Amino acid sequence: MTQEFDYDLIIIGAGVGGHGAALHATSCGLKTAIVEAAEMGGTCVNRGCIPSKALLAASGKVRELRDTHHLKTLGIQLDNVAYDRQVIASHASNIVDKIRGDMTNSLKRLGIDLIKGWGQMAGQQKVMVKTDKGEEYFTAKDIILAPGSIPFVPPGIELDGKTVFTSDDALKLDWLPPWVAIIGSGYIGLEFSDIYTALGSEITMIEALDQLMPTFDSDIAKIAQRVLIQSRDIETKVGKLAMKVIPGSPVIIELADAKTKEVEEVLEVDACLVATGRIPYTKNLGLDYVGVETDRRGFIPVNDKMAVLSSGEPVPNLWAIGDATGKMMLAHTASAQGITVVENICGRHRDVDYLSIPAAAFTHPEISYVGMTETAAKDLGKDQGFEVGSVKTYFKGNSKAIAEGETDGIAKVIYRQDTGELLGVHIIGLHASDLIQEAANAMAQKQSVNQLSFNVHTHPTLSEVLDEAFKRATVS
């Protein structure tokens, strides 16, 4: 570290991405500080990945234990399965506290300074932090912006945090509404529909686009609708826009045709979860001090090295990671971006390979994917002059899935027919979130289906679903 700066690196935001960047920076010998105005761990730990997975784990057990038909096929009989809502909520809260504490302790153990307060740019290589004591200023050779995101609430929707709320409040599980409207059929909407139906709520799922689960591969979406929606106490409203949502008892929802915007129906429900995505939390970052403008949605422009851009050119020594960049709004993407920044700071050229970053929905059964959908792959093939192949294998033919009595699901492999290069893998089924990692690693290493077809998989395991798919996809 040169003597002219307080730190080698200051990171604004202590979410998963900022935390990961700080750990890697310290391992590379950089004197590092991390600035955070709220809780350690950001959205993922406090209001996202961690508490939602705790609720999904608990509610999933309730669903499993109440599935008497499935249990009887295994020779198990249970009666009067009950649960305690408050204990389930406390389970999620306790896990958050533990992980948040572990993250804080890891920073202290490595000598990383944690500065409490709102951080923002105050000039080139300079940060101002609003603390309880007032304004404090720090300098650093390099600065990473990692402010994260907040739920997006469309116009016309009024929140009260009790009867109309986002996932932030839903995770507290303060009560279990008998009838919940969920606006949005993406990952957040699907996961909460899983939680609520397992615990006994009825769901009305509202999607503005003309099909449910619009971002998923079509084959996966088709099965997901059958096993996650049609088989449960869920009604769907597709192509409908929630023009107005008024909190209260009941909650009033005016539904309009998404194209004409004409109100066609009024719903009265007990509660409404707004699961319409997230937007960057990039206000009041002092970006004007360094000549940076966000795009119209609020995202910070960056290049593949994660350097912040101003008029298309990198701003020296300023970087951004995580949800605020608008790339892939996932915690592990933020971590990858943070490590990429530190590597570039240290003079080791590195880009982020977004195509090999996997994603998952932790429903029952789970959904996961990496790479392109078949439609996107075919569009690319048309542009670049190659044919796309795809194969599907089914959990119903897998020995482990049969033994578990969990045979709903498929694995779909998408590849180039000329070279066998893996372009995308999509899975719905038992432990899909774990299975996708093999495909993600293969895509990162640019392996072909020919190479992958020779990998040996343990028998009997669910991983053989992918093994069979790679063997079917082999090209000559």
Image (cartoon, rainbow, N blue to C red):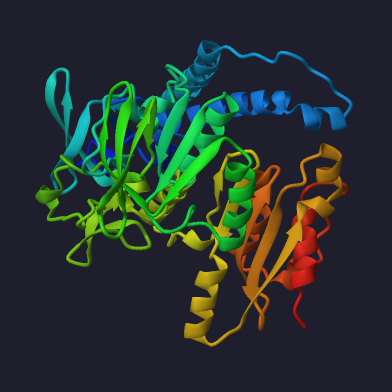
Q: Residue at x 10, y 48 (%)?
A: 289
From the image, which quarter does the N terminus lie in?
top left
Above or below for 68 versus 255: above
Q: Name above or below for residue 216 compared with residue 366.
A: below
Q: Is residue 24 visible?
A: no
User: Percent position (x, y) of residue 340?
Assistant: 43, 53
Q: Nearer the viewer, residue 292 or 169?
A: 169
Looking at the image, how many numbered discs can be counted on the residues?
Answer: 0
Query: Is there any visible trace of residue 366 in the rendered image?
Result: yes
The answer to whether residue 231 is left or right of residue 149 is right
The location of residue 11, given as percent across then percent down, is 31, 39
Closest to the observer: 72 or 35?
Answer: 72
Q: Residue at x 32, y 62 (%)?
A: 303
- Residue 424: horizontal and vertical position, in percent? 59, 64
Horizontal placement of 49 versus 283: left or right?
A: right
Q: Residue furthest bottom?
A: 385
Residue at 45%, 59% in the rendered image: 352
Q: Can you say whether 384 is above or below 460 in the image?
A: below
Q: Residue at image x 28%, y 22%?
A: 248
Give left or right: position of 10 versus 424. Answer: left
The quadrant of the image that shows the C terminus is bottom right
Q: Position of residue 310 (x, y in %)?
A: 18, 61
